Image: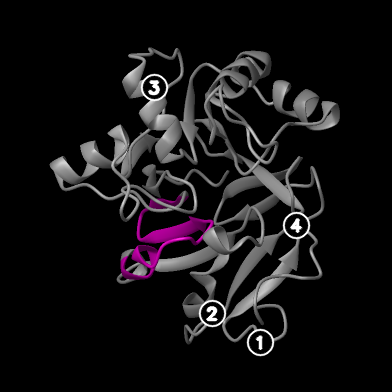
Amino acid sequence: MGGRQVSKITFIGTSDTAGIPVYGCNCAACKMYRQSGRRNSPSCAYIEFDENIIFIDSGSDALLQIREGRKFIAQFLTHFHADHAYGLLRLRHMTVSAPCYHPKDDKGFADLLTREHGLKFIENVPFKSVTAAGLEFTPVPLIHTRPTHGYIIKTPNKTIAYLTDCSGIEKRSLDFLRKADLDAVFIDASYDTEYNEGKHLDFVQANELIELMGARDGFLIHQNHYSLSYIINNKLKLKYAYIPENFEYDL
């Protein structure tokens, strides 16, 4: 691992495409966010250490400002849906070259794959690790409406899994995750138990998968404002709960 001192992973956003609050919505979650002056954007994160930075998904322009003053090492993309990839439309115009690792998907998003500019798009090989500045990233196939890879991220101190978007995890991927000795899992949980259209996990399914993986800790991401309202209105307490925007986890 090269002995580097890793600082933390920070989640710029932890919501789904709509974000929170949603314009015109008066659900309990949107009201709570407005009253506290908060805003939650689509799920994406960055890892920072020394003066280096690595992005995981790019669904928020805020990542572009965070990059300033640091050495940008790489982008790891879970899939090419707009709420995870649209930030790449601006990121690619940087004047330096950096890799963007992604699952095989010939459709891509917009013209990203044909007009790369500073980003160099590299297809993942499932379960084959890539090293970026001494950190190990291993793509793990997930079940979703587009080809999607979660990532096992190994630092000198901890091993975590970033798993979004997904409606389930196939046996081979689940077995691989169980063998990874995970310190923490960050997993898609868009839906509540009363609404699930099959594109994402609900919070009960996500909690069960964290248990099956044997992780020492678990956190829910890609939250929907209606699902958060359901939890608020029913005063539910989840073993593994949703994390807020700007959540930090030491690595």
Label 1 Cα neighbours within 10 Å, binned few <14 / some 14-19 / many ≥20: few
Q: Which mark is residue 103?
A: 4
Task: Quote the CA–CA distance across marks 4 and 1.
Answer: 18 Å
Task: Quote the CA–CA distance across marks 4 and 2.
Answer: 18 Å
Q: Which residue is mark 1?
A: 115
Task: Quote the CA–CA distance across marks 3 and 4.
Answer: 33 Å
In this rendering, is residue 49 above or below 159? below
Q: Residue at x 32, y 47 (%)?
A: 25
Q: Which residues are magenta?
A: 44-65
Location of residue 188 by image quarter:
top right
Foreground: 2 or 98?
A: 98
Q: Which residue is mark 3?
A: 231
Q: Earlier in the sequence, mark 4 or mark 1?
A: 4
Residue 136, percent from left and from top: 62, 45
Q: Which mark is residue 92?
A: 2
Q: What is the number of callouts on the image?
A: 4
- Decide if residue 191 is on the left or right side of residue 169: left
Mark nearest the camera among 1 and 3 is 3
Is the C-beta separation of discs 4 and 2 under 8 Å?
A: no
Label 4 Cα neighbours within 10 Å, binned few <14 / some 14-19 / many ≥20: many
Q: What's under tag 1, amino acid-wise?
A: Arg
Q: What's under tag 3, amino acid-wise?
A: Ile
Residue 249, percent from left and from top: 38, 35
